[in-house]
C-alpha cells in the first residue's frame, strides 16, 4: 500500500473499504473484526419530521382522518408522510414534511407525483375523491432563505394561503387547495406559523 494513501487514511481524507483495513491489519499482526450491534427502539432518521407529524396530528379537527407513511406504487413509487381524508368534502390531502430543502423544483415535482399516485394506495378511501397537497417545512434560516429566494415558484406550486389551510385543518373551513405551512420546531413543542 503506497505511503501517501496510508497518510490520507490516517488524516481522515480517504474512505478505505473493509478489504483495505484487512490489508492494513496484516503488517500490524492484527485481525480485523467487524460487528453489528442491535440497538433498541425505532430508527428515527429525521427527528424534526417526526415531531412535526406529531404536532400536525395533535391539532387536526376530528373531521380529518389521518394515515401515516402511506405507500404508493403508480405511476410513482414512494411514501407519503401523512394522508388526510375528509369524507364530507370527498377530499384527500397528501402531506409532505421537510426539515430541509435542497432543490425546490425537485421537491415540488416529487410531491405532485406522489399525490397523483394516491389512488394506488391500498387504503384509498373513495373513488372520485379530490386530491390536494400540503407541504410543511421546518423554518430555519436556510429554508427561510430558500422560501424568499423562490417565493414565486412556491406560490405557483402552493397557491393557497397558509392561514386558510391551518383554519381548515383545525376547524370546519373548506380545504383551500395546495398550501405550504412553515413549522417552528423547539425541543419541547412544534408551532405552525401564520402567514407566508
Image (cartoon, helix red, strand yellow):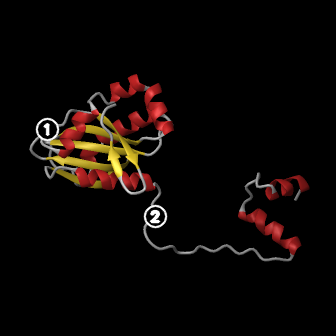
Residue 125 pos. (x, y %)? 17, 50
Q: Which mark is residue 83?
A: none
Left or right side of 6 for 132: left
Q: Nearer the viewer, residue 161 or 75?
A: 161
Residue 93, quarter of picture: top left
Residue 70 seen in the current view: no
Q: Secondary structure at mark 2?
A: loop
Other-residue count near label 2 (Cα within 10 Å), few / some / many at <14 / 14–19 / ≥20 = few
In the picture, the quarter occupied by the N terminus is: bottom right
Q: Front-most of 125 and 39?
A: 39
- Label 2, label 1: how many angstroms apart (C-alpha)? 37 Å
In the image, residue 151 above or below residue 22: above
Residue at the spot of label 2: 43
Taking the view exactly as shown, the residue that stands out farthest to the right is: 3
Residue at screen point 44% across, 71% down: 41
**Residue 167: image x %, image y %?**
20, 39
Q: Relative to the observer, which residue lies in front, 194 or 8? A: 194
Residue position for label 1: 173
Q: Is residue 184 visible?
A: yes
Q: Is residue 148 left or right of residue 177?
A: right
Residue 28 versus residue 11 in the image, above or below? below
Secondary structure, mark 1, is: loop
Residue 20's spot in the image, x, y percent? 78, 62
> Does residue 116 appear to the left or right of 153 in the view shown?
left
Amino acid at each position: 500500500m503506497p505511503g501517501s494513501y496510508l497518510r490520507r487514511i490516517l488524516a481522515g481524507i480517504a474512505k478505505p473499504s473493509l478489504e483495505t483495513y484487512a490489508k492494513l491489519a496484516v503488517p500490524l499482526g492484527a485481525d480485523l473484526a467487524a460487528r453489528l450491534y442491535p440497538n433498541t427502539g425505532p430508527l428515527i432518521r429525521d427527528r424534526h419530521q417526526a415531531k412535526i407529524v406529531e404536532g400536525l396530528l395533535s391539532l387536526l379537527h376530528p373531521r380529518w382522518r389521518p394515515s401515516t407513511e402511506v405507500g404508493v406504487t403508480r405511476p410513482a413509487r414512494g411514501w407519503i408522510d401523512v394522508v388526510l381524508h375528509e369524507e364530507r368534502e370527498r377530499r384527500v390531502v397528501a402531506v409532505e414534511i421537510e426539515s430541509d430543502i435542497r432543490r425546490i423544483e425537485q421537491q415540488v415535482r416529487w410531491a405532485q407525483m406522489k399525490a397523483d399516485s394516491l389512488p394506488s394506495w391500498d387504503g384509498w378511501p373513495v373513488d372520485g375523491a379530490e386530491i390536494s397537497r400540503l407541504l410543511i417545512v421546518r423554518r430555519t434560516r436556510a429554508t427561510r432563505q430558500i422560501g424568499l429566494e423562490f417565493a414565486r415558484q412556491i406560490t405557483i406550486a402552493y397557491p393557497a394561503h397558509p392561514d386558510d389551510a391551518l383554519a381548515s385543518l383545525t376547524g370546519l373551513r373548506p380545504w383551500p387547495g395546495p398550501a405550504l405551512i412553515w413549522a417552528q420546531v423547539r425541543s419541547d413543542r412544534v408551532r405552525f406559523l401564520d402567514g407566508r
